């Protein structure tokens, strides 16, 4: 126990001593740290002073740099401002010039509009004058109508009187029938046969009409045959009149040189040109015969050059004909180009110039096809302008509607289909293609301009003298046709229209039935075929109708 106490006491003493030593050590450490803290505080103040100094220097340098930069920016801004002002001035000047151009253009448009308005005003004045004239004519016609009404009243009065007389006559007729009721057997037989004959004629007319309507469905073959027959009938006249060209010779002695030894020159010429060279006893002329006008023209020019040159032999003939063919091709292209320019078309494909120009050397019923197409173009354009349609499209369709005729003998098919393919190949508009096809009913009309082209085509072909027919003979034929028609009983009026291609007949509806009118049409057609010479065919239309007119007062 004592040992424990002694140990504890020793432990306490050691602990106290250690504590004292530790306290002393801690004190020293605290003093050292305080010293270091004071040094740090002093160093901190110096560092802060140094930092403030450096910060002031940096601020001064930054302010100087900022001031320099600001001055540079101000200078650049002023320069940019000057440049911007220059650009703005140029833009203002440019815009001013553009506005002046626009103003000038608008002034020109305004002047054009003023001219157009003046033109329209003049047209309106003309139309107003025509309307006033028409109004005067209507007033005159109204007076005539009043006179006619008075005449109609008097006619009605006469009709009533005649009806009363007719009724009395019917009564008298009944009495007469009663009187002759006791007729003989032969007389009764004749009366019966007469009535049966009349009924048989009417039945035959009905049957004939039914048969003809049924046959019309299969009439294509017959129509083609009729067309061939018509061409054969026309061929001699056309051959003698319009398929020859005449070349004048300076001397009759040249005929022998043209023929050549054993006919070698004339054979070489005919082989190169494709024509027939006729050398007969007619003095000082040589006749060139061919259905192709282009071949005839080439042959004529070649022969004239050979005659002028004097050297006529197979080699020279081949050389001259080749040269003339090349010149003719250039001439044809130029002719087509001039035609397009004349009508105001500058965007036609150059390859079409040749086909258009070639129409000058093609005829249709003796009418020059190129002149015909130009006439159709002008007519279609005028009608389109009057109706407010596309005048240019109508004129273009008129120019192109017969272009297929330039190659229709080289390619199979109708000239309208061939022309449509040609126009499509060279980029013509759809309205032109439709006009080409529609003018011969190869497809329905999809544009109103196509209908105008067809109408213009009919006008150009139908006008008197268009196809080399003497005006007086044309008038005589029309008068003869009308005289034949008017000679038939129960025909009230007749009109030869469409240049004599159609005859309209108005018959008395009270005196003729439909079947009798049909038979009358047949008889008139037969008599016209027998007594009148005409190209193509004539359509005969008989009109039988009843009209009842009354005027409310």
Image (spheres, grey):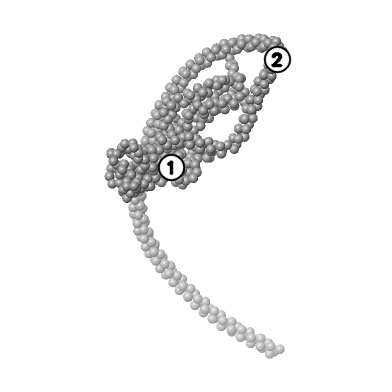
Q: Is residue 322 above or below residue 452?
A: below
| Disc 1 secondary structure class | helix
Residue placed at 59% from the left, 25% from the top? 517
Any part of residue 529 in sight: yes
Q: Nearer the viewer, mark 1 or mark 2?
A: 2
Residue 289 point in image, percent of width and height: 39, 40
Residue placed at 48% from the left, 36% from the top? 232
| Quadrant of image for the C terminus | top right
| Disc 2 secondary structure class | loop
Residue 208 point in image, percent of width and height: 62, 30
Locate residue 166: give its quadrant. Answer: top right
Residue 184 has which mark?
Answer: 2
Q: Which residue is mark 1?
A: 406
Residue closest to the eye, 10 or 31: 31
Looking at the rendered structure, the number of numbered marks drawn on it comes to: 2
Residue placed at 39% from the left, 64% from the top? 58
């Amino acid at each position: 126990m004592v040992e424990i106490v002694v140990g504890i006491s020793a432990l306490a003493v050691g602990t106290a001593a250690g504590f004292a030593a530790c306290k002393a050590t801690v004190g020293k450490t605290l003093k050292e740290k305080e010293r270091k803290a004071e040094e740090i505080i002093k160093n901190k103040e110096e560092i802060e002073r140094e930092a403030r100094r450096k910060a002031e220097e940096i601020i001064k340098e930054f302010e100087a740099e900022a001031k320099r930069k600001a001055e540079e920016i101000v200078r650049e801004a002023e320069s940019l401002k000057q440049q911007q002002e220059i650009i703005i001035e140029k833009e203002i000047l440019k815009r001013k010039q553009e506005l002046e151009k626009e103003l000038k253009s608008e002034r020109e448009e305004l002047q054009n509009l003023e001219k157009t308005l003046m033109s329209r005003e003049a047209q309106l004045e003309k139309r107003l004058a025509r309307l006033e004239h028409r109004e005067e004519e209507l007033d005159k016609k109204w007076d005539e109508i009043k006179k006619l009404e008075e005449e109609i009243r008097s006619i009605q009065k006469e009709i009533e009187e005649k009806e009363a007389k007719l009724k009395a006559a019917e009564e008298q007729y009944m009495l007469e029938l009663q009187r002759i009721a006791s007729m003989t057997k032969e007389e009764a037989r004749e009366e019966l046969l007469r009535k049966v004959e009349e009924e048989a004629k009417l039945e035959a007319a009905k049957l004939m009409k039914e048969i003809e309507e049924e046959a019309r469905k299969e009439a294509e073959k017959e129509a083609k045959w009729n067309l061939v027959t018509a061409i054969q009938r026309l061929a001699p006249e056309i051959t003698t009149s319009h398929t020859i060209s005449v070349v004048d010779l300076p001397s009759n002695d040249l005929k022998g040189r043209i023929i050549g030894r054993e006919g070698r020159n004339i054979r070489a010429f005919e082989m190169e040109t494709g024509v027939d060279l006729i050398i007969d006893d007619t003095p000082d002329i040589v006749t060139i015969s061919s259905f192709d006008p282009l071949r005839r023209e080439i042959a004529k020019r070649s022969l004239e050059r050979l005659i002028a040159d004097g050297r006529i032999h197979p080699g020279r003939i081949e050389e001259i004909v080749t040269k003339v063919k090349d010149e003719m091709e250039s001439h044809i292209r130029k002719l087509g180009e001039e035609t397009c320019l004349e009508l105001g078309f500058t965007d036609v494909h150059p390859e079409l110039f040749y086909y258009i120009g070639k129409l000058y050397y093609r005829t249709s019923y003796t009418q020059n096809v190129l002149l015909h197409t130009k006439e159709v173009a002008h007519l279609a354009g005028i009608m389109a302008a009057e109706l407010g349609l596309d005048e240019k499209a109508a004129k273009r369709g008129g120019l192109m509607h017969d272009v297929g005729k330039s190659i229709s003998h080289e390619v199979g098919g109708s000239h309208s289909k061939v022309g449509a393919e040609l126009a499509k190949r060279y980029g013509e508009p759809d309205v032109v293609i439709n006009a080409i096809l529609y003018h011969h009913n190869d497809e329905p009309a999809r544009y109103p301009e196509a209908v105008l082209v067809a109408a213009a085509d009919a006008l150009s072909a139908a006008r008197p003298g268009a196809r080399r027919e003497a005006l007086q003979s044309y008038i005589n034929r029309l008068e003869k046709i009308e005289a034949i028609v008017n000679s038939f009983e129960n025909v009230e009026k007749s009109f030869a229209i469409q240049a004599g291609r159609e005859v309209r007949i108005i018959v008395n509806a009270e005196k003729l039935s439909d079947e009798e009118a049909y038979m009358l049409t047949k008889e008139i057609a037969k008599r016209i075929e027998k007594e009148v010479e005409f190209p193509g065919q004539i359509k005969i239309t008989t009109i039988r109708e009843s009209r009842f007119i009354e005027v409310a007062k």
